[in-house]
Image (cartoon, rainbow, N blue to C red):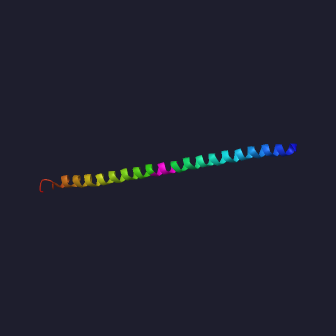
Amino acid sequence: MYSCSVVDEHGDGKGMHIIVVVLLSALVSIMLILGVVGAYKFWEKKIREQDQARLLKLFEDDDDIGDELGLGTVI
């Protein structure tokens, strides 16, 4: 009878240990997912800014060519 109570105490401790492991795993998974989503959003923003800068540079280059050829005064 003494051994049954010892087994019950260890069983409760083991159950609590499993709950803690599951909760920590869920927390780590959520943090990892949030980190990946945040990194993806940052990457998208950086790519969008690079594309906008490339577009602006394209139009600036066209203006420089027009100025060099003196076409600005013709039109």
- Left or right, 36 with respect to 68, comes to right
Q: Position of residue 22 (x, y in %)?
A: 65, 49
> Residue 62 lies in magenta, yes or no?
no
The residue drawn where x is 19% and y is 55% is 66
The N terminus is located in which quarter? top right
Residue located 72% across and 47% down the image = 15
Left or right, 66 with reference to 42: left
* Type of secondary structure dominating the magenta stretch: helix
Report the number of numbered marks. Answer: 0
Q: Please state the horizontal and vertical placement of residue 14, each as a whole percent of the image.
A: 74, 46
Residue farthest front in this picture: 1
Q: Image check: 41 left or right of 10? A: left
| Quarter of the figure that contains the C terminus | bottom left
Tell me if 21 is positioned left or right of 68 in this view.
Answer: right
Q: Residue at x 63, y 46 (%)?
A: 23
- Residue 37: % across, % down: 49, 51
Is 48 or 34 nearer to us in this picture? 34
Q: Position of residue 68 (x, y in %)?
A: 19, 53
Q: Is residue 21 above or below residue 58?
A: above
Q: Residue at x 69, y 48 (%)?
A: 18
Name the residue furthest left: 74
In terms of depth relative to the viewer, which is nearer, 13 or 38? 13
What's the magenta region? 35-40
